Amino acid sequence: MKKQLTIIKNSRHQLHKPPFEVDAGKVTPHQEQPARIDNIEMEIIESEIKPNYIEIENFGEDIIKNIHTPELIHSVREISAASSAYEYSMPYVFSSIKHPKHRSRELKRVSYHCMDMGTPIGRDTFDTAMLSASIAYRGATEVMNGSKLLYGLCRPPGHHAEKNIYGGYCYFNNAGVAAMNFVKNAKGKVAVLDVDYHHGNGTQDVFYDTDAVLYVSIHGHPNSEYPYYTGFDDETGTGKGLGYNTNIPLPRMTGETEYMKALEKACERINKYKPDFLIISLGLDTYKHDPICTFRLEISSYYNMAKRLLSLGYPVLILQEGGYYVPDLGKLAVSFLDGALSVLNE
Ligand code: OKP
Ligand code: ZN
């Protein structure tokens, strides 16, 4: 018997197709490709999962306004609107944010709110990023209506998008949108567990000063891994948020055994917090064959992770973040979903 799972998706994600990025000074094909989601959807067809697909609608800018500044939203919208088909822009002048007196219109346009050369904006980027955020928003709404497990096929990803900065293939913070929806409308406590290989500087930034959302992240150590400037274990929150940010950086090449120990620490922290809702920022770039990362997880590791996380007993919204070994992405996602469903259907 196939197991039912609600999956929220956006069929128009293909419209956002950045052609290249600049990585360590080299122009390379862009890793964050439409084929990523296509591979996951194909593998779901082959799997033991019976997807109940929700095709997302655009809920409008209000859903991002309480986590992002008007300036960031304006910037992404305007750069998108100024692009013609197949034309993408990225910054080529930096540090403007450090020089507020020199915010010329043009400087703002080319780089002011952007942190890297991996996050190009094209004609359909704004709409696609809004739809990705809408998936997250809807996921939280479904949880408020009683859902115990959902999967949001977000693309582009979101966890690097800060209040006032976009970057790392992310424009708007999807997990942040879901968490804020729940905090505002269900008045409940939310934990975000980020298992993407890269530290979610964006999600950390959005909730750094609040105890309404606990952020826990397991990731490659920022001494050697993107985004380099956040993800250290002494970043624990500020003000009311002090103690509500937990970073667990791991060395390069970490395999399943050490990874599961870190996951256990994360679970302990989450259990102490007792959230009403758990959001999982699911990066599949911790896989051993990922082209831009170094961890060594196997396909079956994702089953084990999900099994442990669902056993905590909280309603869970899984949001897709990174993962770049396209040929196996579907297998990794299905492994995680199977592990999750194995607990719910026990
Ligand atoms: C996004 B997610 C410049 C950027 C270099 C960026 C990695 C972004 C990862 N080309 N790499 O966390 O998977
Ligand atoms: Zn990542």
Image: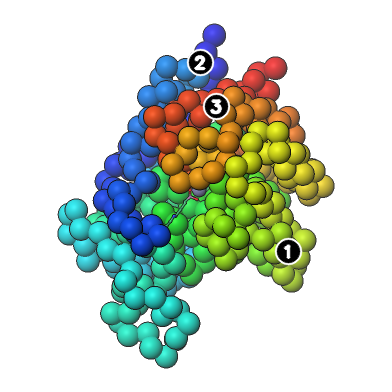
Residue 335 located left or right of residue 215: left
Judge by depth and name the residue closer to the eye, 305 or 24.
24
Image location (x, y in percent) of residue 153? 45, 38
Mark 2 or mark 1: which is in front? 1
Question: Which one is earlier in the sequence, the residue at label 3 or at label 2?
Answer: 2
Mark 2 touches mark 1? (CB < 8 Å): no
User: Which residue is found at the position 41% from the left and 80% from the top?
Assistant: 96
Label 1: few (<14), some or many (≥20) within 10 Å?
few
* Distance in Å between CA atoms under marks 2 and 1: 42 Å
> 76 left or right of 137?
left
Q: Residues under labels 1 and 3: Cα distance?
A: 31 Å
Residue 88, placed above or below residue 291: below
On screen, 254 above or below 92? above
Task: Look at the image and tell me whether residue 132 can be seen.
Answer: no
**From what the image shows, is residue 90 above or below residue 103?**
above
Which amino acid, mark 2?
A: Glu
Mark 1 = which residue? Answer: 234
Task: Classify residue 261 by image quadrant.
Answer: top right
Disc 2 target residue: 48
Which amino acid, mark 3?
A: Ile
| Precedes in sequence: disc 1 or disc 3 | 1
What number is the disc on residue 299?
3
Residue 215 location in percent, x, y?
A: 67, 54
Residue 329 position by quadrant: top left
Q: Where does residue 156 sit, x and y in percent of width and height?
A: 40, 48
Q: What element carries label 2?
A: loop
For image coordinates 77% across by 44% down, the residue present is: 265
Q: Look at 66% across and 33% down and name the residue there.
A: 256
